[in-house]
Image (cartoon, rainbow, N blue to C red):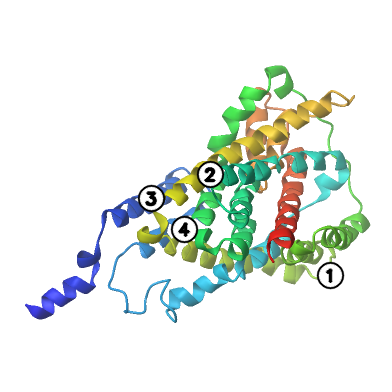
Amino acid sequence: MDILFNFLQTGAVGNFSWGNLIMLLVGGFFLWLAITKDYEPLLLVPIGFGILVGNIPYAYGMNIGVYETGSVLSILYQGVTQGYYPPLIFLGIGAMTDFSSMLSNPRLILLGAAAQAGIFATFLGSLYLGFSLKDAAAIGIIGGADGPTAIFLSSKLAPQYLGAIAIAAYSYMALVPVIQPPIIKLLTSKRERLIRMKPSKPVSRRLRVLFPIMGFLLTAFIAPGSLTLLGMLFFGNLLKESGVTERLAKTARSAFIDIVTILLGLTVGTSTDAHRFLTPDSIKIFALGAASFGVATASGVLFAKFMNLFLKEKINPIIGAAGVSAVPDSARVCQVLGAKEDPQNFLIMHAMAPNVAGVIGSAVVAGVLLATLGG
């Protein structure tokens, strides 16, 4: 009986709490969204299952948990806490991203910049709710809809909120098809949604090769704090566009990024131990994240409408919503909405321009915040 009692005390039964039950339900909900709704399954399946792993209670001292030094999960989680995984994700993103749509119509870069208003709105909202400057900066990046950037910055400025920020960022990225359409419809008229844009002009190979080199030098000088993220992004893109390293580019955008995504998603999920995660501050972070996505989407759409006041060739304001960094989900949302109004209106290539510009923009903002507040 003593052996049985000790077994129960060190296992899940003896350490289970209502918080664990809540988080297990959250993990199940993430898996349901990924499997039945197809919302970002490559992210939500690892994160959702990680939440299940991280909320099976046990007696501390068994050296198996993500917060126990030396355990396997703890070692893998260092890629999150030390900021290893996000730059590697950016390498893969760069290797799979085509910047041609942005280069052929540079004015659409402004839509990617406008959508970063969500970052600053969230930053101010975080300060209002009592978070410190560093914490507010890390929380604000959720408004950029860029999970790796949010993880990278929070690991440097607000490690105590890393789990909440990461889960909030990836949750709302996955829910882009739910969050963005009603905001777009509210802010645009049917006539605006029917605007057709001219096909993008072809971009020369020389320009595609020069862009990652010049783009890196420009952004690195403007925001040295973004050196790690944008260095890897542009390096990955150079592997793709150079034409002489296709083998490396193929590895970076397939097996390599898949491995890092698995490790990142699973370990972020396991970090959501109920005792550390279910706090008033976490609830505030989730609320701020929801508001930030709404502000970012609205800012991009409204800025597109503002640009149309001065342009002869009008921009379909739907694509302003793609200024958030959720690549390529926001661009797909724009395509779906445009096709509902006019099945022959193809917006996805136009939407990719502000979408990839948003990736660069959010990383630059993160670099500025890191340089300003990281000391």
- Residues under labels 1 and 4: Cα distance? 36 Å
The residue wearing badge 3 is: 26
Q: Looking at the image, do the residues carrying marks 1 and 4 touch, with CB atoms under 8 Å apart?
A: no
Q: Nearer the viewer, residue 159 or 129?
A: 129
Q: Looking at the image, do the residues carrying marks 1 and 3 touch, with CB atoms under 8 Å apart?
A: no
Q: Looking at the image, do the residues carrying marks 1 and 2 touch, with CB atoms under 8 Å apart?
A: no
- Residue at 74% from the left image edge and 71% from the top image edge: 247
The residue wearing badge 1 is: 244
- Residue type pointed to by label 3: Val
Crowd band around label 4 with a 10 angstrom C-alpha radius: few (<14), some (14–19), many (20+): many
Residue 344 occupies which quadrant of the picture?
A: top right
First along the sequence among labels 1 and 2: 2
> Residue 357 at x, y = what percent?
77, 48
- Residue at 66% from the left image edge and 39% from the top image edge: 296
Q: Is residue 230 something one can see in this rendering?
A: no
- Residues under labels 3 and 2: Cα distance? 25 Å
Q: Is residue 20 something one can see in this rendering?
A: yes
Label 1 sits on a secondary structure element that is loop
Marking on residue 129: 2
Label 4 sits on a secondary structure element that is helix
First along the sequence among labels 1 and 3: 3
First along the sequence among labels 3 and 2: 3
Residue 151 occupies which quadrant of the picture?
A: bottom right
Marking on residue 47: 4
Q: Nearer the viewer, residue 308 or 16?
A: 16
Residue 212 occupies which quadrant of the picture?
A: bottom right
Q: Quadrant of the C terminus?
A: bottom right
